[in-house]
Amino acid sequence: MSERDQTFIDRCIAQADQALRTVFAEPVGSGRKNPAQSADNNELSAAGKTTSVRLMRINHAGEVCAQALYQGQALTARDEKTRSKMTEAAIEENDHLAWCRQRIHELGGHTSLLNPVWYTGSLALGAATGLLGDKWSLGFLAETESQVGKHLEDHLQRLPENDSKSHAILEQMKTDEAKHQATAVKSGGVELPVPAKKLMTLMSKIMTTAAYRI
Ligand SMILES: [Fe+2]
Ligand SMILES: [Fe+2]
């Protein structure tokens, strides 16, 4: 069955599969090489490991949210082209998810126990913005990617300097998120009103604070 022929129900079933993979298993990515593979494997101090695990857990939780937002928007996007762009970006977000998860496990940590909560909330939010129409949905996406980019920049400063593997992952993610943002704007995303941006910042603050610890 071609993507064009897919019904809403088909998309819901694919969505359920994607949700379970994102939260509980290894999602299917683009097949790109994990950038950490070519980075130095330096020995971190105990404190350094704790910091890296906490920051990478936030990044992983952020990717869970991004995945759910994209999936939610793809579910309700009206334009076929918009939908396929969302699906394409979601595949790259899967790479990010896998890389972060792998690094957390290498460092002996665990992903956020609240991931099912982040996923459900973000999926609903994505579907709701998708219903507002593609220009808002793409605008929301562009703003999300821009805020994620700022977080990544901040985390690159806060990670232990010798954690080359986490640095390599975040650098590649930063490049990808900037590309996703540009694509969303180019595809017709509009600038969101300031209160909407502030609300998004507040929500991400709640998520990052919780994921840092749990
Ligand atoms: Fe991402
Ligand atoms: Fe992204």
Image: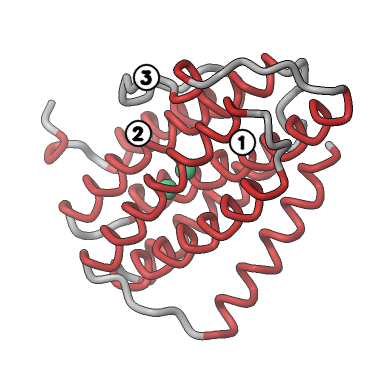
Residue 32, placed above or below residue 168: above
- Residue at 61% x, 15% y is 41
Provide the residue designation for mark 2.
91
Residue 48, placed above or below residue 159: above
Which numbered disc, 2 or 3, marks the residue that appears first in the sequence?
3
Provide the residue designation for mark 3.
33
Mark 2: give few (<14), some (14-19) or many (20+) Cα within 10 Å: some
Position of residue 60 measured from the top left corner of the image (x, y, whole percent) = 61, 36
Which numbered disc, 3 or 1, marks the residue that appears first in the sequence?
3
The answer to which of 60 and 165 lies nearer the viewer is 165
Mark 1: give few (<14), some (14-19) or many (20+) Cα within 10 Å: many
Residue at mark 3 to residue at mark 1: CA–CA distance: 17 Å
Position of residue 100 measured from the top left corner of the image (x, y, whole percent) = 58, 29
**Label 2 CB sits under 8 Å from any ligand 2 atom:** no
Which numbered disc, 2 or 1, marks the residue that appears first in the sequence?
1
Position of residue 104 measured from the top left corner of the image (x, y, whole percent) = 68, 23
- Residue at 29% x, 72% y is 135
What's under tag 1, amino acid-wise? His
Provide the residue designation for mark 1.
60
Mark 3: give few (<14), some (14-19) or many (20+) Cα within 10 Å: few
Residue at mark 2 to residue at mark 1: CA–CA distance: 15 Å
Residue 38, placed above or below residue 205: above
Task: Determine the secondary structure under disc 3.
Answer: loop
The N terminus: image quadrant: top left
Task: Determine the secondary structure under disc 2.
Answer: helix
What's under tag 2, amino acid-wise? Ile
What's under tag 3, amino acid-wise? Lys
Task: Determine the secondary structure under disc 1.
Answer: helix
- Residue at 60% x, 45% y is 62
Q: In this image, 182 relative to 24: left or right?
A: left
Q: In this image, 185 relative to 170: left or right?
A: left
